[in-house]
Amino acid sequence: MSLKLKNISSLPPSDLNKKKIEAKTIDMVIKIGELQHRLYAEGKQSLLVVLQGMDASGKDGTIKTVFADCNPSGIDAYAFKKPTEEEFAHDFLWRIHQKTPRKGNIMIFNRSHYEDILIQRVHKWITDDHAEKRMKSINAFETLLENDNNTKVLKFYMHISPERQQEKLQERIDDPTKNWKHKAADWDENDKWEEYMKCYEYAINNSTIAWHVAPCDKRYYRNYFIAKVVLETLENMNPTLPLLDKTDVGA
Amino acid sequence: MSLKLKNISSLPPSDLNKKKIEAKTIDMVIKIGELQHRLYAEGKQSLLVVLQGMDASGKDGTIKTVFADCNPSGIDAYAFKKPTEEEFAHDFLWRIHQKTPRKGNIMIFNRSHYEDILIQRVHKWITDDHAEKRMKSINAFETLLENDNNTKVLKFYMHISPERQQEKLQERIDDPTKNWKHKAADWDENDKWEEYMKCYEYAINNSTIAWHVAPCDKRYYRNYFIAKVVLETLENMNPTLPLLDKTDVGA
């Protein structure tokens, strides 16, 4: 059964108490920090968090909030921009593969390999056939990370309504502290909203590793939703602090 | 139908004239150099040559001879050694992917990702199930290179008899100019010959992209055989020198 994004709300459930949700989020952020420390010390598994969404859907804010309590030694975030000439001279996964997390680490992708079947498909820079081949390559690539490096791949679609996006893009113009994020081109991409949604749905419906659709119209709920999934994932990975073997200390 | 290496001769056909074969090889090596120049100038396709074989099967000599007339700007060879700590902390294709050729270039792998289902399997460092998963990942990876970067993947199994290998390993001891290649451990690996052959047969029989089994007992025929396949491959790729568009020179 294939998912349709317009059938999923980008708002929080109506009966929530914002203050309580924010307090719970803070608790979870602290626990995520604790588990990241254990993951790093254990050095046997890794976590790849993929954040994909339209402009202003909240990728930067999510990274800043949810992973606030992590030790930078064991976590990194990478924002994939327009490929360089050298990157374009290789297959689309070449630059992505280099940034995958080593054992013990968390890596957050702010945009990712999915752009290569999103913006490139919407603009018809690649054919549908090429996009389908890339989808197969993506599935094989993510499976490789899970099978061969104990890398848990956790993917979020940052679900925002076009109306809410407009408001947030406008904030970037009106609020001087947000001016740096403004790009006129973001408004143009907005004309292609429906086509983007179709390409996102294709990616979500054809992925071997399932996506989480995060309701992102409200920052507090977005942070809560994503922190909850990240925390549960780390709890399931259950990293354990290695203990000294007594023989190592001469006992 | 599955290939059995023991049914394939590692010697040249018996009716060959060595001098003529060597002369033909020199002609082909020059043509390979010309086509490499066109490939580089065109900048749209690339060639990945994978050389896999037992110790002393002739990988280094092949590289030196067959690609002797290529311009180093557009060709590189990389010898994969025991993985570093950083490489071991990632999936097995992580370090391999970084070395794939950019458009316009030739890359030669002296050993490759296949080691991860050869030496690792023979020594039982990975399970058979893990090796089978890796084989699937390899097929998807090579398909990605072909589909997404116009990379032709050309794989050679350097077929040598165990008796001929012994002779060549002995040469490394007897000939001071070859002493630098001697490693005592190579002789140990020799005890596992049959197991290596089984793992090679598995790789060859389960690859999506076909292998070339190069008879390597005689250097002159090995060079001829590989040069011929490389030349035919480059001819089929048919790289063309780009011509100036008249508008670019103001005509």
Image (spheres, coloured by chain):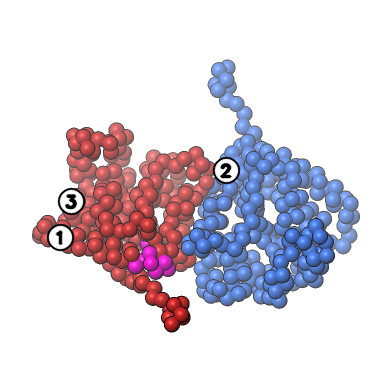
Chain colours: A red, B blue
Q: Say which quadrant the N terminus of chain B sits in.
A: bottom right
Q: In the figure, is residue A149 to the left or right of B66?
A: left
Question: Percent x, y for residue B173?
Answer: 80, 66
Chain where mark 1 sits: A
Query: What crowding class fits label 2: few (fewer than 14 Cα within 10 Å), some (14-19), or many (20 or more)?
Result: many
Between circles 1 and 3, the one closer to the viewer is: 1
Quarter holding residue B247: top right
Considering the numbered disc 2 on the image, is that residue within a helix, a strand or a loop?
Answer: loop
Query: What crowding class fits label 1: few (fewer than 14 Cα within 10 Å), some (14-19), or many (20 or more)?
Result: few
Q: In the figure, is residue B20 to the left or right of A80?
A: right
The kind of residue on which mark 3 rests is Lys
Considering the numbered disc 3 on the image, is that residue within a helix, a strand or a loop?
Answer: loop
Specify start and end residues of the magenta stretch as a single range: A38-48
Chain where mark 3 sits: A
Mark 1 vs mark 2, CA separation in Å: 52 Å
Q: Are the numbered discs 1 and 3 placed on the same chain, yes or no? A: yes
Label drawn at residue A218: 3
